[in-house]
Image (spheres, helix red, strand yellow):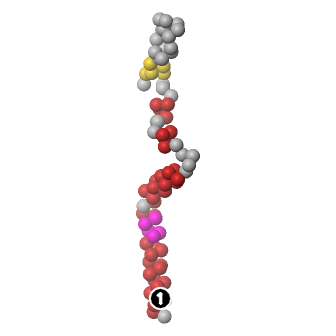
Amino acid sequence: MAAIESAVIAIAAVILGWITIEIACKPCLEKGREAIDQSLDPNYDPDSSLIAPQQQQPQSIIHQPLLDPSAAPSTAKTVD
């Protein structure tokens, strides 16, 4: 009977310890789990998250007049 009581106490201690770690380290564990989920997702593109939203759409574009009408419009400059 003492062996069963010891086993139940040990199992309860392990469960309470696990719950304590989950509560104490919740933000860190959530970030890690999200990273694992993204790495296992076959549709996730890691290159798409490298570009910041501000860099995708410039605030304003200043177009310089083209001297040659056949020139490409690559002379536009972005101003941040």
Q: Is residue 79 above or below residue 52?
A: above
**Residue 46 among those drawn in magenta:** no
Residue at image position (44%, 87%) is 6
Asked which quadrant contains residue 21, the reply is bottom left
- Residue at image x 46%, y 36%? 51
| Residue 23 x/y as whole percent | 46, 64
Q: Residue at x 48, y 19 (%)?
A: 61
* Image: magenta residue range: 18-22
Mark 1 closeness class: few <14, some 14–19, many ≥20 residues within 10 Å: few
Q: Main secondary structure of the magenta part?
A: helix
The x and y percentages for residue 31 are 46, 53
> Which residue is more in the foreground, 16 or 36?
36
Residue 77: x and y in percent read 44, 18
Residue 4 appears in view: yes
Q: Is residue 27 visible?
A: no
What residue is disc 1 on? 5
- In which quadrant is the C terminus drawn? top left
Labels in figure, total: 1
Provide the secondary structure element on which disc 1 rests: helix
Q: Is residue 65 above or below residue 4?
A: above
Q: Amino acid at mark 1?
A: Glu
The extreme bottom residue here reads: 1
Please determine whether, in this image, residue 78 is positioned above or below residue 38.
Answer: above
Give the x, y percent position of residue 50. Answer: 45, 39
Going 52% across and 7% down the picture, which residue do you hit?
69
In the displayed orientation, state which residue is furthest to the right. 43
Residue found at the far top of this picture: 67
Q: Is residue 16 above or below residue 49?
A: below
